[in-house]
Image (cartoon, rainbow, N blue to C red):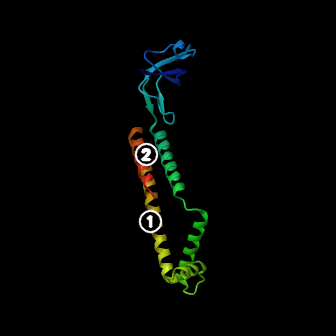
């Protein structure tokens, strides 16, 4: 089987698989005024066009980079959403962080969340405060690494020479992101 492109006014309108150059009867379409050319593959409509005269696929590198950079952002956002902490838990973490930071400047600061946890765990408020701030610092470092990875992948896509290389970078980023916990 070969892949054929059906062009009207120089614009690719459809592709079909057929052993020989198809006729209108073969594909159930009126091909009057259309050009049919053999294609190596279906062009990616986000950034590729096909030549009606030669069937050659032409890529627009800038549009390809934009498409793959947007795909990297979508992969990142989907994974971030999958890893998201529920809103109530986020509020509690933010409150404990605020209390821990307040203790850094005022040892007499009001700390209802940390005090309640200390009463339940037997730890001191100061120890809990240190642990909270250490977890915050670790989370910031993880977020920074993830953002650097996203930005690096987008930069690599923009620097890549071909859409195939851009796709490889995007696939590698997807693989990396899938391992995030």
Sequence-wise first label, 2 or 1: 1
Q: Given contact means CB atoms under 8 Å apart, are the residues at marks 2 and 1 in contact?
A: no
User: In terms of secondary structure, where does tag 1 sit?
Assistant: helix
Q: Residue at x 52, y 51 (%)?
A: 78
Residue 50 in the image, given as x and y percentages of width and height: 47, 27
Q: Residue at x 56, y 82 (%)?
A: 119
**Total numbered labels:** 2
User: Residue 38 is drawn in which quadrant?
Assistant: top left
User: Residue 109 is drawn in which quadrant?
Assistant: bottom right
Q: Residue at x 44, y 30 (%)?
A: 58
Crowding at label 1, few (<14), some or many (≥20) Cα neighbours within 10 Å?
few
Say which of 41 and 125 sits in front.
125
Q: Is residue 114 above or below residue 89?
A: below
Say which of 169 and 176 sits in front.
176
C-alpha separation, residue under disc 2 versus residue under disc 1: 23 Å
| Quadrant including the N terminus | top left
User: In terms of secondary structure, where does tag 2 sit?
Assistant: helix
Q: Is residue 155 visible?
A: no
Residue 121 in the image, given as x and y percentages of width and height: 52, 79
Q: Which residue is mark 2?
A: 170
Crowding at label 2, few (<14), some or many (≥20) Cα neighbours within 10 Å?
many
Q: Is residue 20 above or below residue 103?
A: above
Q: Is residue 176 above or below residue 17?
A: below
Residue 91 in the image, given as x and y percentages of width and height: 60, 68
Q: Is residue 21 visible?
A: yes
Q: Residue at x 48, y 33 (%)?
A: 44
Q: Which residue is mark 1?
A: 141
Q: Is residue 14 above or below residue 103?
A: above
Residue 111 in the image, given as x and y percentages of width and height: 59, 81
């Amino acid at each position: 089987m070969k892949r054929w492109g059906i062009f009207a006014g120089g614009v690719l309108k459809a592709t079909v698989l057929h052993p020989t150059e198809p006729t209108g009867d073969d594909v159930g379409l009126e091909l009057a005024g259309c050009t049919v050319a053999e294609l190596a593959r279906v062009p990616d409509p986000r950034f590729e066009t096909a030549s009606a005269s030669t069937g050659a696929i032409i890529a627009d590198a800038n549009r390809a980079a934009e498409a793959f950079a947007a795909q990297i952002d979508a992969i990142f956002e989907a994974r971030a959403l999958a890893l998201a902490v529920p809103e109530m838990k986020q509020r509690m973490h933010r409150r404990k962080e605020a209390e821990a930071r307040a203790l850094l400047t005022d040892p007499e600061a009001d700390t209802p969340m940390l005090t309640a946890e200390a009463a339940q765990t037997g730890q001191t408020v100061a120890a809990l405060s240190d642990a909270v701030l250490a977890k915050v610092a670790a989370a910031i470092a993880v977020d920074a690494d993830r953002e650097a990875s996203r930005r690096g992948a987008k930069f690599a896509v923009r620097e890549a020479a071909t859409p195939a290389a851009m796709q490889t970078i995007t696939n590698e980023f997807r693989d990396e992101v899938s391992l995030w916990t």
